Image: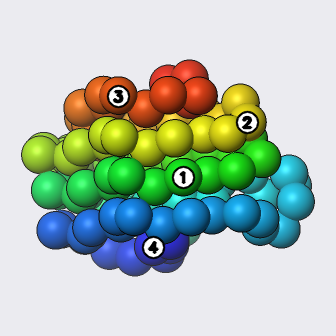
Amino acid sequence: GLYKSREIEGAVIRGNLVTSGFGHNFPDLIYVVADTNSTAYYVKDVLIEDNTLQGGYNIRLEGDAAGGGTGNVIRGNVSTGSGAIRVSTAANAATTDNPGFTVQP
């Protein structure tokens, strides 16, 4: 994932098989968050697609309302458990065709 980053633009996370992580204490295994803990930034043209997450893990995409988000897409991902796609409103991401996931704010 991308964490403690400033602006995130043009990132592509595609075609991964994610089978385990740090347990359900850290459930967001695909993690793209534009935030340095002191300031949040924008996410733009991020593509998360065709990944398989086993065991009910989550996908997370977050940007800041001030920087916003445009062109972000989460599609074609599969959860073999009961995973969630967690997207901040400011990230403004289109989420389509992600079987096994529920979309949450």
Q: Give how far across and how far down residue 6 sits, in percent.
A: 32, 74
Q: Is residue 12 left or right of residue 25?
A: left
Q: Amino acid at mark 2?
A: Gly
Give the residue displayed 44% in from the left and 44% down from the top: 77
The secondary element bearing badge 1 is classed as strand
Query: Which residue is under mark 1?
Result: 52
Inter-mark Cα distance, 1 to 4: 18 Å
Q: Is residue 49 left or right of residue 7?
A: right
Inter-mark Cα distance, 4 to 2: 23 Å
CB within 8 Å, label 3 to label 2: no
The secondary element bearing badge 3 is classed as loop
Q: Give how far across and how far down residue 84 sits, in percent.
A: 60, 34
Query: Which residue is under mark 2?
Result: 81
CB within 8 Å, label 1 to label 2: no
Q: Nearer the viewer, mark 4 or mark 2?
A: 2
Instruction: Name which of mark 1 and mark 3 comes first in the sequence.
Output: 1
The front one of 82 and 8 is: 82
Q: Amino acid at mark 4?
A: Leu
Q: Give how far across and how far down residue 89 sits, in percent.
A: 35, 30
Give the residue displayed 31% in from the left and 40% down from the top: 75
Residue 2 - label: 4
Q: Nearer the viewer, mark 1 or mark 4?
A: 1
Query: Which residue is under mark 3?
Result: 97
Q: Amino acid at mark 1?
A: Thr
Instruction: Name which of mark 3 and mark 2 comes first in the sequence.
Output: 2
